[in-house]
Each structure stands twice: as structure tokens, then as C-alpha cells.
Amino acid sequence: MTNNDRNPATATATGILEAAPGTAAPHDKDSKKGEDSKKNKDTKKNKAQWRAAKALAYFALIFTGLMVLAEPWLLIPVAALLLAISLWD
């Protein structure tokens, strides 16, 4: 970026450009529309991640239960893991 491209009103002492608070970027002609569509995409992504995490948690729970039924001594590391998770915070 050359000095001709910089706006002296928004330039800082270090030469990094910062937008004024509450102003839209010049390339965002319809910033509200862009924010709404991005928010909607983020919501869908979060919902998909939540569903995947929930499915993985149920799979792990069922698989662990089957392993404990097959070999009861496997309950020891499962109990240790649950204790470690409960003491994490």
C-alpha cells in the first residue's frame, strides 16, 4: 500500500489503518445484509457442529458401555476419566 492510498484521518502513528467505530468498510455497500447472511451461516455451522458433537458423544457412550459389558475391568479407566473430567474446573 502506498502513502497515496492512506486516509490521514484514519491512519495511526505506526501507519496502520483503522476504521472509525460504527462505520462500515468502503467495500461493504450493504453491510447489514452481509452481517445477516453471515450470522445465518454461522448459526447453521454451529448447529451442524453441535449435532455432530452430540452424535459422537452418544456413539462414545454406547461403545464404552459395550466394552464395559464385554470386559468389566474396563470400568476402571472409564471411572478415572469421568473423575478427571469432573475435577477439571
Image (tube, rainbow, N blue to C red):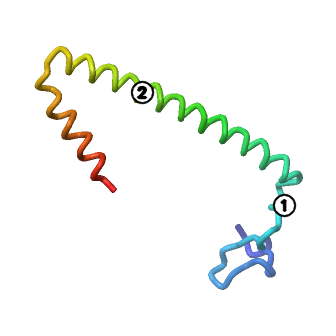
Residue lying farthest top?
A: 70
Q: Quadrant of the C terminus?
A: bottom left
- Judged left or right of residue 77, residue 40 is right
Quick one: SS at disc 2? helix
Report the residue marked by disc 2: 56
Q: Quadrant of the N terminus?
A: bottom right
Please tell me whether mark 2 or mark 1 is closer to you in this view.
2
Report the residue marked by disc 1: 26
- Judged left or right of residue 22, residue 64 is left
Q: Is residue 61 above or below residue 50?
A: above
Q: Nearer the viewer, residue 19 or 38?
A: 38
The circle on residue 40 is none
Q: CA distance from mark 2 to mark 1?
A: 43 Å
Q: Nearer the viewer, residue 21 or 85?
A: 85
Pinpoint residue 44: horizontal percent, then vertical percent.
Answer: 66, 35
Pinpoint residue 83: horizontal percent, then vertical percent.
Answer: 23, 44
Q: In the image, what residue occupies the spot 77% across and 72% down?
A: 21
Label 2 CA crowd tier, 10 Å (few <14, some 14–19, many 20+)? few
Q: In the image, what residue occupies the spot 83% across and 56% down?
A: 27
